[in-house]
Amino acid sequence: MNHEELKEFLDLKVKEYNTSNFIPDDPVSVPHRFKKKQDIEIAGFIAAVFAWGQRKTIINKSVEFLELMDNDPHSFVLNHSAKDLKPFLNFKHRTFNPTDALYFIHFFNWFYSNNESLEQAFIVKLNDVTIEGGLINFFDTFFSLPDHPNRTKKHVPTPARKSACKRINMYLRWMVRDDNCGVDFGLWKKIQPSQLVCPCDLHVDRVARKLGLIKRKQTDWLTALELTESLRKLDSNDPVKYDFALFGLGVMEKF
């Protein structure tokens, strides 16, 4: 496929998958249960962090976690008592355990006591080509509390550790992209869609390699940047919209 054919093909696939029909079976359905900005931010973050393995399990465990927050996450993180935290001592999702759960709540309590929106933690300069600095800043902010458990670091990636940051990049897509198609929320305005980096999971990685969008052998932060740079040649303002096409081709069509 030449450049024009590839763009035409992927643009068609974006139109096919970037619709409200995509929501019910995807982790993005979890924040879509909420209306308030901070609830969407917290619910989306939980769903993104839990997003490895089967999508049905990811959704179920995210819903279970939010039910422990009385389905009112912003109010819960600000106003919970010690007694309210007890049910989290039995919560587990894969390697995410009660220690992680309690630290997440502790961080959100501290952060939302001082900030209106989680966007503040992803500080990025207008002239930054990508969100890389924002991701590093978020990791540093998240683990800035003196009592953070070291084990929890495996659940929050950073480019500083060469991680492809798939789940956080997916979360940022949800929060930043605003195209009126109903899937992504477009809540955050200080980060440009052009600065986002494409979430690079197994399916996206496989399809992108078949289409010649990635040449790098391993899958890490530089691979995510390489993929995004290739997608930027198709749409410089909104390269990450092609996540819908690559994911749809990989998961729905087994391309």
Image: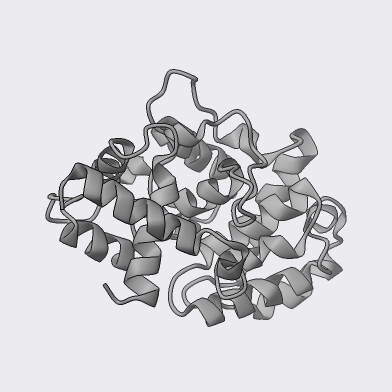
User: Which residue is at a point 70% across and 41% down the rendered structure image?
Assistant: 111
Quadrant of residue 166 within the rendered picture: bottom left
Q: Looking at the image, which is closer to me, 229 or 83?
A: 229
**207 above or below 127?**
below
Q: How is the image coloured?
A: one colour
Residue, x 61% and y 53% (percent of image)?
Answer: 181
The reply to whether residue 105 is visible in this rendering is: no
Give the image location of residue 76, x and y in percent: 83, 58
Q: Does 20 sit left or right of 81 as displayed?
A: left
Report the label total: 0
Q: Residue furthest top?
A: 127
- The front one of 53 and 23 is 23
Question: For this view, does 160 lie left or right of residue 211?
Answer: right
Nearer to me, 66 or 179: 179
At 25% across and 63% down in the image, what residue appears?
A: 207
Query: In the picture shown, does residue 19 fall above or below 236?
Result: below
Q: Residue at x 39, y 56 (%)?
A: 12
Q: Position of residue 51 (x, y in %)?
A: 49, 67
User: Residue 68 location, x and y as percent?
Assistant: 77, 73
Q: Is residue 167 left or right of residue 202?
A: right
Q: In the picture, which quadrant includes the C terminus?
A: bottom left
Q: Is residue 92 left or right of residue 232?
A: right
Q: Position of residue 7 (x, y in %)?
A: 30, 47
Does residue 39 show up? yes
Tell me the quarter of the picture where residue 52 sits. Answer: bottom left
